[in-house]
Amino acid sequence: MELQEDFEEHAKKIMTLTEEPSNDDKLILYGLFKQASFGPVTTDRPGIFKLKERAKWDAWKAVEGKSKEDAMNDYIIKVKQMMEC
């Protein structure tokens, strides 16, 4: 299976989890998904009072150096780990 197809399949699979992922896991997945889909962060960091948006931006910024392929692979691995629990 092609990496892009595998990535898209796992992006759908994450929605079928029976247990809600932790906030940390959600942020990791968010950052990897954004890096794989859009590349490096291109916006300014949200203000201090926008906690949710700031946490998401920080998660994306944390994986900024990863290539699209590496971000996809890491996303797939993370989803597989979460599905095993």
Image (cartoon, grey):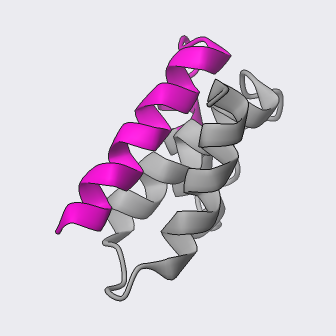
Number of marks present in the image shown = 0
User: Which residue is at a point 36% across and 83% down the rendered structure image?
Assistant: 20
Quadrant for residue 43, please give it: top right
The percent coordinates of residue 65 (x first, y second) are 55, 11
User: Which residue is at a point 33% across and 59% down the rendered structure image?
Assistant: 24
Give above or below for 36 relative to 8.
above
The percent coordinates of residue 33 (x first, y second) are 62, 43
Would you say residue 75 is visible in this rendering?
Answer: yes
Quadrant, the C terminus: bottom left
The boundaries of the magenta stretch are 60-85
The percent coordinates of residue 37 (x first, y second) are 76, 35
Would you say 43 lies left or right of 54 here? right
Find the residue positioned furthest to the left.
85
Quadrant, the N terminus: top right
Is residue 15 a member of the stretch shown in magenta?
Answer: no
Foreground residue among 40 and 17 = 17
Would you say residue 54 is visible in this rendering?
Answer: no
Find the residue positioned furthest to the front.
1
Give above or below for 84 relative to 42.
below
Give above or below for 50 relative to 66.
below
From the image, give the main secondary structure of the stretch colored magenta: helix
Foreground residue among 5 and 40 = 5
Foreground residue among 48 and 72 = 72
User: Which residue is at a point 42% across and 47% down the rendered structure image?
Assistant: 28
Would you say 41 lies left or right of 26 here? right
User: Which residue is at a point 63% across and 65% down the rendered structure image?
Assistant: 12
Is residue 76 a member of the stretch shown in magenta?
Answer: yes
